[in-house]
Amino acid sequence: MNEKTILQFERIFPGIWRARVCANTDTGGMGTSLTAFYKHEPRTEKLDSLPEAGFPFDGAPGGEAFCQSDGDAGTVICLPLRLSERLYGLGLNYQRLCVNYAARQLRCDHYGGQDNGRTHIPAPFYVSDRGYAVLIDTPEPVSFYMGSSVRRDAVNPPPEIHRFREKGWSAVTPAEYVEASFAAGGCDVYVFAASKDSKSPMRDAAARYNLWSGGGFIPPKWGLGMWQRVSGYADGEDVRAEAAAFEEHDMPLSVIGLEPGWQTAAYPSSLDWDEKHFPDHKSLMAELASKGIRLNLWENFFISEKSTLYDPVSPYCGSHKVWNGIVPDLGSPEAVEILSRHHKKLAAEGVSGFKVDECDGFDGWLWPDHASFPSGLRGITMRAIYGAVLQRMQDDAFRSLGRRTYGLVRASNAGAAHLPYVIYNDCYSFPQFLTGTASAAFCGALWVPEVRDASTPREWARRFALSALSPILMLNAWASGAKPWKFPEIEDTIRSILRFRQSIAPALYNAFRGWYEEGIPPFRPLCMDWAGGASEKGGELDDTENPYSLGELLDVTDEYLIGRDLLAAPVAPDSDTRRIILPPGEWYDFFTMERVENSFTREFALDEIPLYVRGGAVVPTLGEDGALVLRCCGREGEGIIYDDDGESFGYERGEYSLIKVIFADGRADYTVESHGYEPGYGDLRFVFSRD
């Protein structure tokens, strides 16, 4: 390995620095930048307005950040680490948040039951509780060693300890660097830091990363309603019957999702309408739209010979097939343009969005790592970018029509916060759904804990309650054919949960506005805003079950924040009781508006959803009569309620409205600011907490 090269960081925005690492190729090109593939555009004006921050590696005990390269052998990036730091990130995780001492080989793949680096979002990005974040911007698979690989040239090496004669021995030997290695090639290393006076330094460092990624998105308003995915065998009449059944059961419905059967071929896909089973798909979508229901289409991008896309895209496909379908080269502008034109046509006919499946991995049914593509990209690189480039392609198609979309995808990567998609997979573990909802914030992404089926009424209700507090409320019945009224004895409970989701839509919309405008993840773990909450899990030394006695620092993984003011703590399906841990400060029950203790244990009925409001907050909700009901919690406080047309990109041009509220002692005043858009709500009412 070559000698150390000190990384030269240049300030590119307040609190953001970049160092360029060169190894055999120039940096910044398509071959060396992960994020360049999907063309994010930093929110320059917003970033320039942020306060300055100190460079986080200055004065680190181990010295400066450096790299080492050795021709074709690879590149190693070494980033200073204080022993007291706690680190988070390295992709979408489902079992834990803190990644101290972890060794992760990041690779785009389906989730296989372990947080080992094979994940739907293998983002080479981590956040420190010292208020900074790091991105290694390369499409190569990156191996991370999070402070447990001690170098021989360490400035402060840990002491050697006799395991059976001295106290304090551990299999983990704390190191003074995070080390990241990848195959030969250049990269950019970005550092994002919060200002010194930040009250939530981890959150604010991640927010700068999201703003650099283009900012978050604001979904169309219909995307925050109820989604029902129908059986893969459904035809046009089945879709009409589905919509009618929801109306008969008096349950709200915003989106119907079609699975592979809408196409003339599936596995491989044609991406063409099956006119036999959907002979009038345009009028079908018009009928649904008249009822406020949109249509979402399932896809994968392994193209069948039966497809109208086959001949045009064939010259721009890779060396291997998947399920006998050709694989478009998403490093080829020609291939992306062909796919974009096709999706623009589907969107123009009335489709609202897409569910992009099978783009994450699983070695047994994807192209191999050594596959080649006309653009020159290797198979492993194509795997890293595939999901994010498809998101960008589809978003561009809708943007060309002036309409927002909101979709589902199985893979993404770092720097894709600006793309309007939510990650899903085949896992169905309730605890891991909860952790994933929180963990996605460390990727600049969103995760959907969908409902599929249940064996008991209690499980059914608990899963719906979790989904109602997530980016998308969805029943995915592609295989089960289940309906929300699956258990008649709790149909009223499910109906109340769906209506609850409708009622909090303005609050969710406000949270997404914070993501777009400030980069703050709308769904995130408690540790992002508060440094506390960690517990240590150890174990007795045992020569078979626990030979290393590894300690793990775990944050709260079964609660998460929504926007600035809400905290969700869903109840597990196998229990009616749970412990609630609330951060410092005043908190109020969302439903009763009564103040609650910061930590307590209680029983929750099936129609009770643990949701809490920060003291001093104003939470916008919808009343059953369509009025905007503002919940004011605490003796005094203030809030801003955001609104726009919910469909177009006018908000990006400054077309929106703000209702600014100040309240104290049971009285409230407000002003309305209209910026090219008048608030779309009806009457306005206030509800005050009971202290």
Image (tube, grey):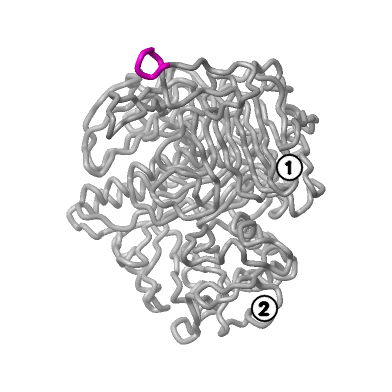
The residue wearing badge 1 is: 70
Q: Can residue 255 be spotted in the picture? A: yes
**Residue 395 on image: x %, y %:** 64, 59
Taking 567 as reference, is 33 left or right? Answer: right
Q: Quadrant of residue 2?
A: top right
Q: Quadrant of residue 381?
A: bottom right
Q: Nearer the viewer, residue 501 or 49?
A: 49
Res 314 label: 2
Q: Main secondary structure of the magenta part?
A: loop
In the rendered structure, which segment of residues is drawn in magenta? 162-168
**Kind of residue at disc 1:** Asp
Res 172 label: none
How many marks do you count on the picture? 2
Q: Quadrant of the N terminus?
A: top right
Residue at mark 2 to residue at mark 1: CA–CA distance: 38 Å
Residue beneath the point at 70% across and 27% down: 65
